[in-house]
Image (cartoon, rainbow, N blue to C red):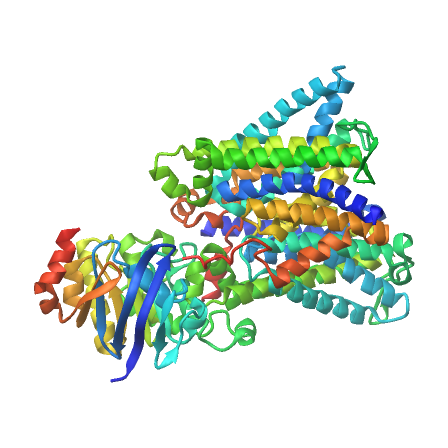
Amino acid sequence: MRRGPRRLAGIIVVLAAAFLVAAPFAFKPYGIFILSMWAVMTIAAIGLNLTLGYAGQISLAQAAFVGIGAYITALLTTKGWPFWSTYLLGGVSCFAIGWVLGYPALRVQHHYLAFVTLAFNTLVYLIFRNEEWLTGGIYGISNVPRPEVAGWSMNGPKAFYYFCLAHLALVSLATWWLIRSPWGRAFVALRENPMRALSLGVDTRRYTLMAFALGAGLGGISGALYAPLVQFVDPTPFALGLSLNLLLMVVVGGSGFFFAPFLGAMVAVLLPEWLRFTEGFYLMGYALLVVVLMVVCPSGLLGLAARLVRPAARRSARSTAETSVAGPDAAVQSEGAR
Amino acid sequence: MADILQLLVAGLATGAIYALVAIGFTLLWQTSQTINFAQGEFVMLPAFFVLIGTGYFGLSFWPAVALATVVSVVVLGLLFKRLIVDPMMRHGVLPLVIATIGLAIFFKEAVREFYGADAQPFPPVVAATEVTVFGVTLALQSLVVLAISIAAVVALQLFLSGTRTGRCMQACAQNPTVARLLGIPVERMILYTFLINAALVTLASILITPIYLAKFTNGEWLGLYAFIAAIIGGFNQVRGAIVGGLLLGVIDNFAAAYLSSQYRMAIPLLILIVVVLVRPQGLLGRIEERTV
Amino acid sequence: MSTVLAVRDLKKSFGGIVAVDGVSFDVTEGEILGIIGPNGSGKSTLFNCILGQLRPSAGDVRVDGRSVTGLRPCDLNRLGVSRTFQLLQIFPQLTARENLILAGQEHKGNMFSRLVGPPDAGLSEPADRMLEFFRLDHLADEQAGSLSYGQQKLLDAAMAFISGPRLALLDEPAGGVNLTMLTSLRDRLKAINVERGATFVVIEHNMEFVMALCDRILVLAEGRIIAGGRPADVRRDPKVIEAYLGH
């Protein structure tokens, strides 16, 4: 990005961060709750952005991973386990499951991962719903406690909001580091031109698998925060609908752009609350927006913004057709070289 | 024994319907690299078109079906191709898949908002009577569904292998570049596959909705079954879609009868995961050459 | 001088069409080998079979004595074989320097070290030096997509050499490059061979380019080698002339 737009983006980010920190003092508890939900969903969306935006794979199982993380935390913290252990367990388990699921599915071409994750999500939902002895079935697990950090209780809405926000910040930093690193460069390569990437020694299969597993792990962490946020865990939120919603979040934001999950989650979580649409119509409009976006500008809203900012550079940069949805955030890469 | 035969026939009947949907799905993939994630919703919709025909326009069943078929072929075939698939060809496979996901959600929510969330009964093609064949009592509906589906598949195969247009379509599916060089109007051939798919899903809709009632959520599992059938059979083989669909129908039916209803759906899902693990090219598929 | 590449009886058919029909040759360390032939003679298919893009129907490929037939391109690359493609394939969104870092990073350390180590995998310096060698250093921070075609071709070539490969296979490096750039390209390729001992094989249509650059030339026609030897000899070989004129 050129100097001007980069500075503008920087200003926007700083303002947004300031807003996020100050917001709880202006909002009622319900508003703070929604903001916390936004933060938690953004973490799940960041994970999905790794899978879709950077590795170019469609995953329809993110909701299942959020659910697994949520149930692990709910089950264990209600039995007295400390939060940090459940959250690590959730993240690591989901990472491992992602690896196991992705390994065979990614050996094949043709987006098999999409179907496998679709099946997996449905399967996991069935298990959540049917295995009452484990998950409480449709009755769920209630009274999930909120954690304590260094003796400070996170019970109140404001305190827990900052807890979620801190996690979002950590995850964002970690992802930023990942994208700047050689891994990030490998992701750009395998997404833009997998054949060329292979010929340069990039093990596209391994990197794609990594991206998917990391995405799954982040889903698990998101779930671990979801459980104490809502304090009641039942199967309904983790059905296919949430997977689709998260997917749309990333896509609308602009998959492959660093800030896409933040923007997408805002559109999916905050906007409907603020605009007070009925859920059905909002979802219809949202889905229609996605279809239109895919036709007009597959790299989402941030892609549109980028196009407005540097039209000349983008036109000359069109290489293979597959680059379009996974929008490039190579600007970050260029930073990494210095 | 009689029970098993009944289950088998019923399973083959629903399996044949899955096969129809899976064939359409496979055809779209073969000819234009379109992965239509909204295929399930495509099957869910025509039934509602019929219901609107009988409900709002007061038509009787068969005229409503005719109207619904026309609407489906135009909307799910022609408009789908022209408005959504064509503009996105240049962007590659991924945006198109996501657009069809968006389309699926849109259709589902539209039906829920504008028609209603309740399951609607749907008139079957024949009355729900039973017949006795070779001393075994079978549901007439199953036999008729099976017969119609087989007829449709046979007709399709005859069209694809026996007519000039059909052979041109096959050529396009195998190698569009060469087909173009041979003077085949590739774009038109691709349009035909979209129209055929629309016809297939309409037929499937009319055959399956009587059994499961018209509900806006039908698309979810119908689509899933179509994908599973296509993958089990071998993703880029029409014959594979047929085998996959039939197999899936039979297995699903037996699972419903002998396993807990709660986990009935789990069996096809597990089969999918196993197939991808063990034999990703499906039963009839070929292992694909690495890309050049 | 050791044999870097040994190809034996390589065959590749697509259905009924035989694209490569029993090709055998060696590449010695430090030489520049050229492969020429009329269109459709199987040159690119040959490369793709050697490089793991296609699985050969028969035959054996050895790099430094080790069989590599059918290995994945990325594994082959890590064994020290790099390539360029006929259709230019640099990464337009990355800078020139970034492209080179990418080309070299998979040879540095392992997956984990690449995650926690420096963002440039310690390759900024070598990348800059390579850019300097190819006279592209003033473009280091430019997006590769904004370079001219000829400059991109040079960058592409640089990417093939940055990891210090045992063997580089260049598929039509001169294709579409204008005359001034052509001289620069040929000069730099010759230099990297002379100054750094880089071994490489070049497929080319541009006769002048290939004759001036290569130590030895093989001529392919209809999937078979019909002639081989020094450029001057090959040029005069009647079989070669016929192969070209006959088409």
Q: Is residue A26 visible?
A: no
In this image, B86 relative to A92: left or right? left
> Of C103 and C209, which appears nearest the observer?
C209
Count the marks.
0
In this image, A52 relative to C69: left or right? right
Q: Is residue B7 visible?
A: yes
> Of C103 and B45, which appears nearest the observer?
B45
Q: Quadrant of the N terminus of chain C?
A: bottom left
Image location (x, y in percent) of residue A253: 61, 46
Q: Quadrant of residue A90?
A: bottom right
For the point 68% across and 68% down, the residue is: A96
> Of B225 and A330, which appears nearest the observer?
B225
Relative to C178, is C3 above or below?
Answer: below
For the point 43% across and 74% down, the residue is: C78
> Of A92 and C45, which appears nearest the observer?
C45
Residue sitting farthest toward the front: B134
Image location (x, y in percent) of residue C113: 54, 76
Image location (x, y in percent) of residue A295: 53, 37
Q: Quadrant of residue A232?
A: bottom right
Relative to C45, is B124 above or below?
Answer: above
Image location (x, y in percent) of residue B111: 74, 31
In this image, C121 relative to B131: left or right? left
Residue sitting farthest toward the top: B58
For the point 50% across and 47% down, the residue is: A324
